[in-house]
Image (cartoon, coloured by chain):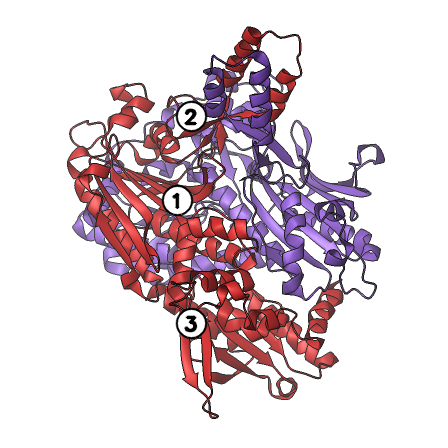
Chain colours: A purple, B red
Amino acid sequence: MQSHCVRSVLCTLKRPPRRETRALQPPSRHRGTSSGDDPHGVGRFMQLCVDRHYVSPGHTNTELFQRGVSCVYGPLGVELRRNLLEQWWRSVTRSSAQVFGINTLCRSRDTATGGRGQLGIVESGCLKHLIEKHELSKEQLIQELEKLIQRSTSLRTDFLQGALEQFVPSLDLVNRKLPFGLAEFGPCFRPSDAEVTQTSLAWFCSPRTSSQWLDHWAQQRLKWWRKFALSPSDFSSIDVPAEELEEATSRGVRIVYSFPWGREPLETLWSRGHTELLQTHKGVHSKLQCRDGRKSVPHVVSVTGNMDRGVMAFLCNSLQQLKKEDGMQKLLRRKVLKLHPVLAPVKVALDIGRGANMELRQVRSTSERIISCCGLTRVSVSMRCRYDEMGVLFAVVVSENTLESGLLQVRSRDTTIRETKHISEIKNFLSRYISAADNL
Amino acid sequence: MQSHCVRSVLCTLKRPPRRETRALQPPSRHRGTSSGDDPHGVGRFMQLCVDRHYVSPGHTNTELFQRGVSCVYGPLGVELRRNLLEQWWRSVTRSSAQVFGINTLCRSRDTATGGRGQLGIVESGCLKHLIEKHELSKEQLIQELEKLIQRSTSLRTDFLQGALEQFVPSLDLVNRKLPFGLAEFGPCFRPSDAEVTQTSLAWFCSPRTSSQWLDHWAQQRLKWWRKFALSPSDFSSIDVPAEELEEATSRGVRIVYSFPWGREPLETLWSRGHTELLQTHKGVHSKLQCRDGRKSVPHVVSVTGNMDRGVMAFLCNSLQQLKKEDGMQKLLRRKVLKLHPVLAPVKVALDIGRGANMELRQVRSTSERIISCCGLTRVSVSMRCRYDEMGVLFAVVVSENTLESGLLQVRSRDTTIRETKHISEIKNFLSRYISAADNL
């Protein structure tokens, strides 16, 4: 079966990729110049995301993407979001702060909140069943419907409620000492049919420090977003104006991204006091008191991010359009998706030269093994003309020459410089490059 | 803020952990011997999972866990499931086979399937709104309910439908060459209120090879489960009997785990033919044909896993009860959760000796930094009497001695041997240990 796979990859080399022509001539509705019918270049940006397999095609789907809610991502978008979530998880659970991961169910029968943070649903099968009972009078039908509503389950709209519920069992892990946090990420649901990939940190601290902690986390989060940015100043934080404060919150900070069409929030931090925590635990102070010197009920700072919009922000932020003239005075436009090395979904692509023979295939599969050991994803060779637009960090070329010398050509996305390296160096070179970028 | 955190960790040392007493004297309903009221030791096993923060407390919750559906996990359970899913993702997307990650939405408005793989839902808010319209006659009410059902959205019950839909856009990535796969994981929903963390691989191959591929993947998957097992023979594969074949499937294989109370399926593989793929794309052969020499519509092999039951299987599989006599002829029972190093949620715990002074704190925070660089999670010191039951791989003890010599004591969960190591060696030692276990 093994050789079967390798063969399938090699064969793709013989024909030109099918969609390149289309990609070079984008559909006319996206051809507008920056001052024309696509004023912010949004159409062209969306088309690039689709063509380079970040977002799955279809108008409805790209609309979801642009709204900053979950859409169907393409394979590269899936990896980008995974990388982003992984980085978030690390930054939160492996910081010097005590943060534990928790999980709540997407759908539950809990009614502790009286509906806050939840979206009641009824299975339409049950409803159909009721309608078919023709013998029911209107009053009986309404009664049955009411019963159905009472038995309805809920989809979570955020993670806060889950964190408030998990506060008590977690006290044991920290021996009732503040501060500590509970973190979670995953899909959350909104009325109508939207869902959002949310991240959530609920931070429990003593009442007198909650405002300081809000500032601390706002600063940490902004630093995190900027760490992965090509142009960090597009990310900024703003205080939530007093008139927009939510119930039970005393202060708020938003991390926003300046999209070409305007600013949109990526993450929101609230100082929430202890009202909701008390409510969740039915006002039983004794269960909630912590050993912070004063036996007080902790205050909650909530940090909620939208990682679907985060994916869009980083794609937007890292797209560079470079113009240069070639020898013939022809203006070349080169688009490069300069995603941060740790976020880039494809770290390295492996190309094999023409005239592939049996030995060459073996070198290819050896190189592939080396690279995949390194924890790096490869990509189908049919895409090699578009590596820069896909954000592929390095392209490695295996040629007939490699057979004798063991040398490979390594091209960098960011410098476009080609270096010759020995096959045995590649793994170390790549992992050093990525971890250096991570530690910057 | 930094010093604040460190202080909070240190203070926990001064008082004994609160729940140890309880853990040593499990509640009477779980005290039964293996031949008594807890014949398979299920109750004691569940209690351990709760006490050691794998599963959140509460009878309803442990019942979900035992049924093999998603429950609310504790912080250690969250990490264990994350590690398991990460290993699955790697094994599937970084194998020599061409597999791309995709994602579908939990909730959608698609009706391409006529309801297969989906669970129709109606928001109970809309229903309430209808009931409150007192002026409606019974007929009008029924009409309105029917409209509501027509506009209902669906929760996914599996990932197959999404993969079948993403087949066409993915053809571009592989230049229409078979075989290739589409992978996804996340929550899927069942009627009533259960949800399951599913993994899914949809493998598209030429019709003449589909049976071979089913065998290939069944073998790969069994190997994967056994890789992380303490007792691999508890995992096995069985052919699905002819009478249990589902519609549209021609052959099936199940990977099962032998729990103390019986065998339960962890993963199911089906050879599905092309009926559903054709149905999804409205029978348009031309869109689906691939270049496998015969321009045929591919067959689908589906591989669907339940990672919630997977978590339970590995917890069950790795729990060892050791008996030994101490010097006083007293029988000691020692429970060790020998989770595979890559799955263990806490790789290393850091203990600080008594008489903590300022310098000792500094050593602690240095060691902590070293360890967290290494990508390892730490745990609250209040739990240190229970490291073995939590499956913590190594416990590192920082003592006053460390200040002068730089030496730490490292205790292994599996050998119980204590070794003295220099602080500078720790990071390498741990990462070598874990990656060695990974490559076995």
Most extreme residue toward the bottom, as rendered?
A: B327
Name the mark on residue B199.
1
Which residue is label 3 attached to? B433
Q: Nearer the viewer, mark 3 or mark 1?
A: 1
State which quarter of the image contains the N terminus of chain B. Answer: bottom right
Mark 2 surroundings within 10 Å by alpha-carbon count, few (fewer than 14), some (14 through 19), many (20 or more): few
Vertical order, A103 against B5 (above or below): above
Secondary structure beneath disc 2? helix
Residue A20 falls in which quadrant of the image? top left
Cβ–Cβ below 8 Å for labels 2 and 3? no
Q: Is residue B330 above or below residue A201?
A: below
Residue name at image x 48 percent, y 50 percent:
B63
Secondary structure beneath dot 3 equals helix
Q: Horizontal placement of B9 versus B319: left or right? A: right
Q: For numbered disc 1, what is the local secondary structure?
A: strand
Cα gap from disc 3 to disc 1, whole angstroms: 28 Å
Look at discs 1 and 2 and give the one toward the viewer. Answer: 1
Query: Split into 4 quadrants, where in the image is the C terminus of chain B?
Result: bottom left
Q: In the shown orientation, is residue A131 left or right of residue A313?
A: left
In terms of depth relative to the viewer, which is nearer, B272 or B74? B74
**Disc 3 crowd, CA 10 A, few/some/many (<14, 14-19, 20+):** few
Residue B27: give x, y in percent of width and height.
55, 65
Q: Amino acid at mark 3?
A: Tyr
Spatial CA distance of label 2 from label 3 is: 50 Å
- Residue B72 vs residue B286: left or right? right
Which labelled disc corresponds to residue B53?
A: none
Residue B393 appears in view: yes
Q: Chain of mark 2?
A: A
How far apart, in angstroms, are the residues tagged by discs 1 and 2?
37 Å
Query: Mark number for residue A24?
Result: 2
Amino acid type, mark 1: Thr
Residue A246 in the figure: left or right of residue B155: right
